[in-house]
Structure formats: structure tokens, C-alpha cells
Image (cartoon, helix red, strand yellow):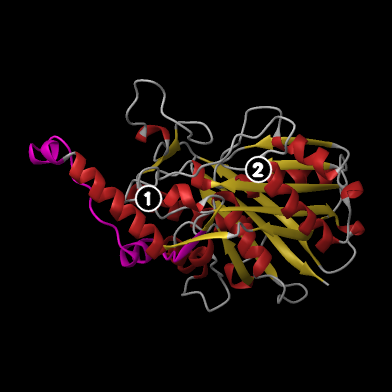
Amino acid sequence: MYKVAITGTGVFTPEQVITNDELVTAFNAYADKFNFENNDAIERGEVAAKEHSSSEFIFAASGITQRHVMDKAGVLDPNVMYPHFRKRNDDEPSIMAEMALDACTKALKQSGKTANDVDCIIVAASNHERPYPAIAVEVQGLLGAGGFGFDMNVACSSATFGIQAASDMIRTGSIRSALVVNPEICSGHLEWRDRDCHFIFGDVCTATFLERADNAKGPHFEVISTKCATQFSNNIRNNNGFLRRSLPAGLTDQRDMQFMQEGRKVFKQVVPMVSKHILDHLSSEGRGASELKRMWLHQANKAMNDFIGRKVLGRVPEEGEQPNILQDYANTSSAGSIIAFSQHSDNLKTDDLGLICSFGAGYSVGSILVKRVG
């Protein structure tokens, strides 16, 4: 059995940014338009009027101040309220593969490796651009890597589940290395016209390079162990495919076909599930929460993360122990915990212990226990 190391990460961040104020202006314009057009039905009590949103409401509910997106214009158009992506020819790189290529190149550079050193590519994300061919195989071709690739989906836990799959293959010797890539275009499945969730998501792509520890060229993080769990719940779901382009003939509303969640139920059920999962994972390795120097949690909701941190540590986390990137990126599904790890891990010392954890629809939760080496 081989030891597994994380030797590089990469983050692709879209250039376009939507602030809370910009989002609120667009949403409120849409709400006013909806209320005007449906005034008679609203007065008869047949249709509920749309309430205005506010930047204060968004920040209090989530801790988010802005989000990066692949298309700003469509989202902020009160007559559209979803991103516009041009149709690409089949001989062009897909939008997810294009994002992935950038993140993978950065991860390989940090690892001191090239595409020739990649044996496996796993594209793990909450939504995929197409059923087949796999985005991972497309990324493999664009990189010029050998080996094989495949896609997987465990919603917001896709990254950690992908890291577990890659780690297991490296440990057994079936591969030497793997890129786990998380291209998340969450703006494509968010219902931007729903006040309760219109602020939640952003777009990004992360990549994590894992390899046999004896091949690592410098300081890295040894993967001590991984732990995954799922429990079915319908409280977070997306009944549609990847991107919404137009309504089918005769259909005037497809709210049920976009991202939906029962937020209060999710908070009540997921927080204890995740806290217990982390503590059980540590216990199985003979470790205690007091040994953790850092937790890189899924970036969905600041209040949820704060609660989990207190539950695991038995106290309020100190500054830097549980870094948040939510305020700048919003919820980026599976990529969130990897962004936090990528941006807030360099200052750990040799033998410091940390834990990457993501959780979400399924319900699912995945945790990666790591130790700084060198």
C-alpha cells in the first residue's frame, strides 16, 4: 500500500462578479414587473406577490457579499434572470472542460508535474454539461494526459468523494496519480427569480492533484484517511438537467426543474449529521478534535459552518481555524471546501493536522483527514 499526497491545487475564478447590490436591483425590478403583470390575480388572492430582496437580508441569511459568474448579463436582466451561454460546436471545448483546463494547469504547476504524470482524471461536480462523452475524457484530451477519466456526481460532496476514489486507487497501486476536478457552473441551475435562494450560488472550478507520496517533489499534505456517508433526503434537489435555455412548448413555469431546498430542514438535519461524521472520523484514527489545526468546510452558509465548528471543537473556532471564502465566492457547491483549502493551507507547519469536509444534497458528507509534510 502506498501513502497518498495532495501536492497541488488550482482554482479557476470567472472574471465577472455580481455584488449583492447589483443582484438586488435586478431581482427587485423583476419582482415589480411580475407584480404589475399579475396585479389582478394577486388582488384576487390567486397569486402571491413577489417580495423585494435586500443586501442586508442576503448577508444575514448567508454571509455572502458577492459571487463570480460565467455570464453576468443574463442573470441581471429582469426579463431573463438566468445566464446566457452560446451554443458551442462539437469540435470546440465545452465550457466545463475549458474551466477545468485552467484549474488543472495551475494544480500541475504547483505540484511540479506535467500532463505526462497524470494517470487518471475525475471530473466530480454537482451538474454536468452532458451525459456523454465524459467531461473528464475531454479534459484528458485537452491536457494531453494518458490513462483514463470518468465523471461522477455526489452534489456538493463531489470533490471529497472524488478525492476518496482517487486516494483508494493510488493506495492500491492501480494508478500513480490523479486530478480531481470540480467545474461548477451553479448559476445554470439556480432559480434567480426566487427570493429565498436567488443569492446562494456562484461559478468556479477547482482541481486537486494527488499522487504517491514517494513521488512528491516538495512540501505536501499526506492523506491520512477518508470517510464518506450518504443518507437519502429530498430536501435539496434539482429535477432538471444542466442548463436552462428555454421553456418547452406549452410550459409557462418550471420552478420545480431548478435548484430547490427546504432550508430550515436542511440546517436542522445536516448540521448534526456532519458534526458527528467529523468526530467519528477523527475517533476512528485515534485523534481528537483538539489536534485539528484547521478545518476547510463546505462553503454553503456561514451560520451552518459556525455551528459545525463549535460542535466539533467544543468552543468557538479561533480566527484562521475555520477559514471562510463564502463571502467572496458564494456557494460553489463541491468546489467550496477546495477553494478554502487552496487559499488557506500554506501557513500550516510540519505534522499539523487538518480536515477537508463537504456536505450537501443526498444527504452526503465526505471528509479528508490530512497532515502537513515538509
Residue 147 at x, y percent in the picture:
87, 37
Q: Which residue is outermost to the top?
A: 250
Tally of numbered tags:
2
Query: Which residue carries the number 1 mark?
Result: 197
- Image point (83%, 69%), residue name: 219
Query: Which residue carries the number 2 mark?
Result: 96
**Residue placed most toward the observer, 356 or 15:** 15
| Image quadrant in which you'd find residue 122 | top right
Q: Is residue 71 visible?
A: yes
- Image point (48%, 66%), residue name: 327
Can residue 229 be found in the magenta stretch? no
| Left or right, 92 with reference to 195 | right
The tag on residue 355 is none
Residue 117 at x, y percent in the picture:
90, 49
Please say if 273 is above or below 151: below
Instruction: Tell us which disc is closer to us: 1 or 2.
Output: 2
**Of the residues shown, which amino acid type is indicated by label 1?**
Cys
Determine the secondary structure under disc 2: helix
Magenta residue span: 39-67
Residue 213 at x, y percent in the picture:
86, 58
- Image point (35%, 54%), residue name: 26
**Residue placed most toward the observer, 123 or 89:** 89
Can residue 53 be found in the magenta stretch? yes
Please say if 319 is above or below 132: below
- In the rendered image, which quarter contains the C terminus? bottom right
Query: For mark 2, does the 10 Å Cα neighbourhood hold few (<14), some (14 to 19), or many (20 or more) residues?
Result: many
Residue 265 at x, y percent in the picture:
34, 47
Q: Is residue 5 visible?
A: no
| Left or right, 154 with reference to 145 | left
**Of the residues shown, which amino acid type is indicated by label 2?**
Met
Determine the secondary structure under disc 1: loop
| Image quadrant in which you'd find residue 105 | bottom right
